[in-house]
């Protein structure tokens, strides 16, 4: 066996476990899902597996699904922007802390949402935001309101709870990008006359773009498909993609339509991430 | 002479750890000054204080006659070359060099002209469009220098700029740095732990140790007349012999070393009986098969070991009291004139011998 073949074999060996797992748990089910989505359900709720595009036609025609897409998009934009605006400055601050203990404590706080079950965390928000919850109770005690402000079930409450859940996914990639920067780069910019703000815009931010990109993509992918958190905070009527799929599949038991919607969500998510990647890449080149 | 950079009583501590103790330093206009010392001696801290990245705990920093303690680094107009070069990886050569000029909002034509000028200075014409990652270490070094010079700074600071280059390139860049500095005439402060770099480059050098300046002077002054054993050791690793002052006649000083008398010169105020270290450079001593009768300093010895280096031979000899001395002999013939195990005499002139206060114990304490 010559060297080139040995090299190829080694590459194949290294890739094989990941490829096998991915094929078994993602690619094959996706194909299955797509096949299922081509079937249809008649008025007697029996499912036919002959090929038709009726589910996709239903999605294109019915305004209910358009509202759902719009709702998910709106939520994604809000969550991604808030995560970036809240996460970047906090991460930047955290990276520059000299005390190792203080830094570790802050890291632990950042990661802490990941350590608690989504359900518990979300019920925490329910307790806080309910009509007789902590926030309304406090406002009432201080005489700021007469009757409770409705927060639970609103779009705003979904945004807040989702940002809380997903913030670490924005901060950790940014932290790793910022940590990888040579501290001399910022000093070099300052020695050349750049104020701290100019240094940030021209050097730190462009060079941390890979982290911003990774974080934003993660948050977008997770928000487009988010399910438990909005369901618990805002109920099953909130016009969101994943909740719609849940409703169609488990309440109407229309598996083919649910499969079609799932497949559309998958393609849609990939498309949005691709778009965001190109957009941020272009911004990055312009700053440089 | 005009003074460009002036440190007065500058002290620095990180938390409760002091790293600089009352440093006084004058850097003259246009001179090339090196801060030399082992790692942790405070030389980089001193440089960062001048650049403005660190604020001294006490003392004042002056630049061109103005106290600049409260001036942030981006208003000091000081160029800096970093050990890692710190080139902006997302910009090409042109944008790196133009960075400071764009910040100063010069017009694009002026920027292009200036970038071309400094790139020519560091012999990188035609490299403007290259991305940084495509440059070799030596070329990155030149871009870093060009970028610092482009803003026409008052002072150029360099933090161990040659330490990431291989030995041959380092020698080449050394010559080039010197040429460049002379040509531009810019006041330069150069931090290094490499004595050879400091000796070859500097108009003046400052040896630092444990947060203090040990001695400042021209390379020849420091090499010929070190004032402390530390400076003597750091510049050239000489031989040390320990004894006490036996007699003084002006500068001529007799030192008793292991029962023998050595004559040396010293300007230091040393009393008779004081413990001293005799500094003898390996290059100043000569070996003779038998002691010449007219020599003042001639000690009997045995040759322990010969290291043959072609044009030089380095001998390690043992004196009668057991002390070891290194002697370097120039051998034009290429044949060493002594062999191992041979008895010989090691001789040197009192003018080439320095006497400094210090005992074997006090030097050992300093880690020498």
Image: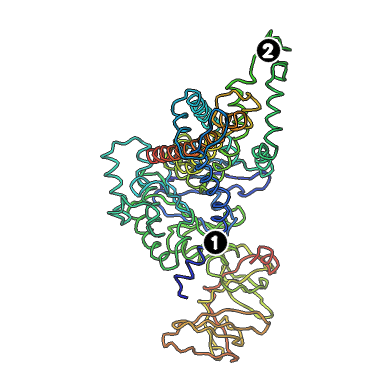
Of all residues shown, which one is farthest toward the top? Answer: A146
Q: Secondary structure at mark 1?
A: helix
Position of A40 with respect to A122 (left or right) is left
Residue B307 coordinates in the image, percent (x, y): 53, 83
Which residue lies under the disc numbered 1?
Answer: A14
Up/down of B256 relative to B212, above or below:
below
Q: How is the image coloured?
A: rainbow
Residue A167 shows up from this direction: yes
The image quarter containing residue B57 is: top right
Q: Secondary structure at mark 2?
A: loop
Residue A261 coordinates in the image, percent (x, y): 51, 34
Up/down of B287 relative to B358, above or below:
below
Q: Are marks 2 and 1 on the same chain?
A: yes
Which one is in front, A97 or A216? A216
Other-residue count near label 2 (Cα within 10 Å), few / some / many at <14 / 14–19 / ≥20: some
Residue B52 shows up from this direction: no
Which one is in front, B86 or B68? B86
Q: What is the quadrant of the C terminus of chain A in the image?
A: top left
The image quarter containing residue B268 is: bottom right
Residue B316 coordinates in the image, percent (x, y): 58, 82
Other-residue count near label 1 (Cα within 10 Å), few / some / many at <14 / 14–19 / ≥20: few
Residue A203 coordinates in the image, percent (x, y): 45, 41
Which of the chains bears the disc numbered 2?
A: A
Label 2 or label 1, whichever lies nearer to me, is 1
The residues tagged by marks 2 and 1 sit, at their Cα atoms, a distance apart of: 59 Å
Task: Say the numbered circle drawn on residue A148.
Answer: 2
């Amino acid at each position: 066996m010559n060297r080139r073949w040995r090299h190829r074999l080694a590459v194949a060996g290294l890739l094989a476990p990941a490829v096998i797992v991915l094929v078994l748990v993602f690619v094959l089910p996706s194909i299955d899902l797509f096949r299922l989505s081509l079937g249809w359900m008649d008025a007697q709720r029996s499912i036919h597996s002959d090929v038709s595009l009726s589910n996709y036609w239903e999605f294109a025609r019915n305004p209910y699904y358009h509202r759902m897409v719009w709702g998910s998009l709106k939520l994604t934009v809000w969550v991604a922007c808030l995560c970036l605006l809240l996460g970047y400055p906090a991460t930047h601050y955290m990276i520059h802390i000299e005390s190792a203990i203080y830094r570790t404590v802050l890291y632990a706080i950042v990661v802490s949402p990941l350590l608690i079950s989504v359900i518990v965390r979300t019920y925490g928000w329910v307790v806080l935001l309910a009509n007789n919850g902590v926030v309304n109770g406090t406002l009432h005690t201080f005489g700021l309101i007469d009757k409770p402000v409705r927060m639970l079930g609103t779009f705003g409450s979904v945004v807040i709870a989702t940002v809380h859940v997903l913030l670490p996914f924005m901060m950790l990639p940014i932290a790793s990008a910022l940590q990888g920067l040579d501290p001399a780069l910022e000093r070099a910019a300052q020695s050349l006359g750049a104020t701290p703000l100019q240094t940030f815009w021209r050097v730190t931010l462009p060079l941390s773009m890979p982290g911003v990109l990774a974080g934003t993509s993660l948050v977008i992918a997770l928000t487009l498909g988010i399910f438990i958190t909005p369901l618990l905070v805002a109920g099953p009527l909130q016009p969101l993609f994943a909740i719609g799929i849940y409703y169609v599949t488990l309440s109407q038991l229309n598996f083919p339509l649910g499969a079609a919607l799932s497949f559309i969500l998958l393609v849609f998510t990939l498309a949005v991430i691709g778009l965001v990647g190109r957009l941020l890449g272009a911004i990055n080149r312009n700053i440089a | 002479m005009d003074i460009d950079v002036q440190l007065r009583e500058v002290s620095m501590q990180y938390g409760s750890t002091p790293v600089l103790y009352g440093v006084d330093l004058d850097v003259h206009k246009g001179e090339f000054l090196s801060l030399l010392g082992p790692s942790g001696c405070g030389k980089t801290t001193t440089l960062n204080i001048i650049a403005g990245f660190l604020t001294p705990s006490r003392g004042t920093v002056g630049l061109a006659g103005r106290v600049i303690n409260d001036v942030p680094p981006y208003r000091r107009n000081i160029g800096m070359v970093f050990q890692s070069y710190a080139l902006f990886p997302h910009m090409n050569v042109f944008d790196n060099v133009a960075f400071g000029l764009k910040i100063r909002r010069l017009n694009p034509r002026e920027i292009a002209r200036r970038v071309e000028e400094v790139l020519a200075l560091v012999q990188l014409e035609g490299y403007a469009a290259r991305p940084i990652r495509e440059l070799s270490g030596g070329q990155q070094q030149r871009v870093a220098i060009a970028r610092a010079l482009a803003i026409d700074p008052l002072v150029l600071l360099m933090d161990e700029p040659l330490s990431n280059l291989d030995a041959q390139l380092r020698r080449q860049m050394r010559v080039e740095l010197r040429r460049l500095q002379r040509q531009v005439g810019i006041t330069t402060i150069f931090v290094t732990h490499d004595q050879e770099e400091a000796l070859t480059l500097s108009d003046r050098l400052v040896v630092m140790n444990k947060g203090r300046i040990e001695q400042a002077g021209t390379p020849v002054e420091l090499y010929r007349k070190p004032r402390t054993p530390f400076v003597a050791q750091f510049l050239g690793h000489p031989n040390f012999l320990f004894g006490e002052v036996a007699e003084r006649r002006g500068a001529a000083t007799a030192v008793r070393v292991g029962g023998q008398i050595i004559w040396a010169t010293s300007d230091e105020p040393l009393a008779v009986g004081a413990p001293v270290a005799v500094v003898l450079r390996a290059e100043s001593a000569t070996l003779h098969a038998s002691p010449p009768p007219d020599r003042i300093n001639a000690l009997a010895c045995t040759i322990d070991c010969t290291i043959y280096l072609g044009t030089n031979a380095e001998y390690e000899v043992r004196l009668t009291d057991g002390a070891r001395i290194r002697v370097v002999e120039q051998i034009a013939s290429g044949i060493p004139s002594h062999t191992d195990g041979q008895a010989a005499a090691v001789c040197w002139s009192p003018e080439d011998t320095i006497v400094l206060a210090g005992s074997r114990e006090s030097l050992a304490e300093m880690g020498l």
